[in-house]
Image: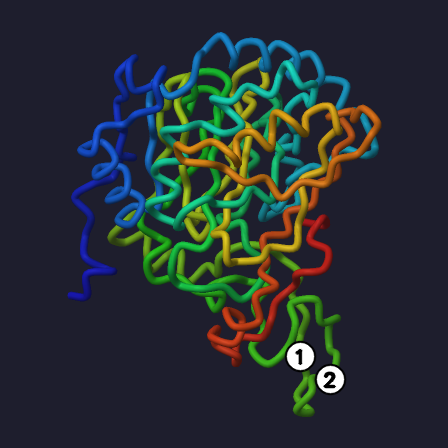
Amino acid sequence: MPSATAPFDFQEPTVVQLSDEERTTGQMTIENIGIAVSAMHRDGLVVLENAVDTSHMDAINTILVKDAEEMAKMNSTHFNGNSVDGRPTGNMSQGPPLDPELLYEDIWANVPASAVLSAVLGPKPHVNYVNGNTALGGFGDARQRVHADLFFNHAQFPFAVVANYYLVDVSPANGSTELWLGSHHDTSFRDHRNCHPGGRADTPPEEIGKDGEVVKGELEFGIRDERLEARRKFAPPMQPTIKKGSVVLRDLRLWHAGLANPATDPRIMLAFVHTPWWYACPARVVLPASCQEKVESWAARSQHPVQYDAHFVPASLDHKKVKFDPNFSSANQGYLSMLPAQLGSGYVDDVSKY
């Protein structure tokens, strides 16, 4: 039996328990880095526990919980529906506050996480996306389709990792994310519902393709049902329990799904997407100029630097109105030339509809 489809004997996320010294100094032991890097390659995900000062998470959570009710009523708020039956899931995009004093380094440029990211992606990874994900209560059993956060042809090696920060303890009781551990191993763009070999994923229904064939457009976002059922037989999904103060590193290729939040309070998770220095992602994080000195200091630090591909603007920014723009594509033509051309490029121009 191929190793990619062998029954798993590990069905829970690997948790690396950091000591208080590792958290405060940022110096992970080489053994813990070894565990974390191995888990990233094997499972596509690792949890670094006790990596963040929980008082920082509490401060941000207090602000965002208050904002969540307001944002849920705003026309500009992006809701991550993507459900099988079209029902609303209560899953909305909600980014962190952008005031300089609230850009905590152990969230925006966490040193233990950066050590693992540098080992997986190479030195000085770039951050191209900052946002968050909130699961509101009161939406019954609605859920997202299983998906990976990709809309385009992509590599079959680690090229993007998201660092997630749950601002509270999470479990199935308040809508932790469904995870398909190890699904990043043998997946490609071919597994995505919006992949159309020989054409783009935004092809309108019944449009004539470039070779004269009729191409049926499929704008649904998610992993194809047959691939899910094949994997479910030997590696079914699970819903983790994760402590506040943790950093969850997830390979962007990993299959997952947002599930309903049975609790009353919103479950809020921040998201920072990292790509290799050579990847040349065109996306930029828009930040106020008042943050520039702090953000650029993280790139200049000698210990595990983090480079933000940022566009700094002179005005203050309302974090409640940050545009949802999950563009994780690459502009590196050499890299793109190595992808399987028969799968098409995918949809990289405007993915906000998803």
Q: Which comes before the other along the chain, label 2 or label 1?
A: 2
Amino acid type, mark 1 = Val
- Asked if marks 2 and 1 touch (Cβ < 8 Å), the reply is yes
Image-quadrant location for residue 207: bottom right
Residue at the spot of label 1 = 215
Q: Determine which of the numbered discs, if any, sits on residue 94 in the image.
A: none
Residue sitting nearer the eye, 223 or 139: 223
- How crowded pointer 1 is (Cα within 10 Å; few <14, some 14-19, many 20+) is rated as many
**Residue 117 location in percent, x, y?**
39, 41
**Residue 139 location in percent, x, y?**
61, 27
**Residue 281 location in percent, x, y?**
60, 55
Q: Is disc 1 placed on a helix, strand or loop?
A: strand
Identify the residue shown where x is 54% and y is 40%.
307
Task: Please state the total of marks drawn on the protein image.
Answer: 2
Residue at the spot of label 2 = 208
Q: Is disc 2 placed on a helix, strand or loop?
A: strand
Identify the residue shown where x is 35% and y is 53%.
183
Identify the residue shown where x is 78% and y is 30%.
321
Identify the residue shown where x is 58% and y is 48%.
84
Name above or below for residue 199 compared with residue 100.
below
Q: In the visual, does 30 lie left or right of 122?
A: left
Residue sitting nearer the eye, 186 or 208: 186
- How crowded pointer 2 is (Cα within 10 Å; few <14, some 14-19, many 20+) is rated as some
Q: Residue furthest bottom?
A: 212
> For the residues marked 2 and 1, what is the alpha-carbon distance in whole angstroms?
6 Å
Image-quadrant location for residue 161: top left
Q: In the visual, does 230 lie left or right of 315?
A: left
Residue sitting nearer the eye, 348 or 182: 348
Name above or below for residue 182 compared with residue 335.
above
Amino acid type, mark 2 = Ile
**Residue 241 location in percent, x, y?**
35, 24
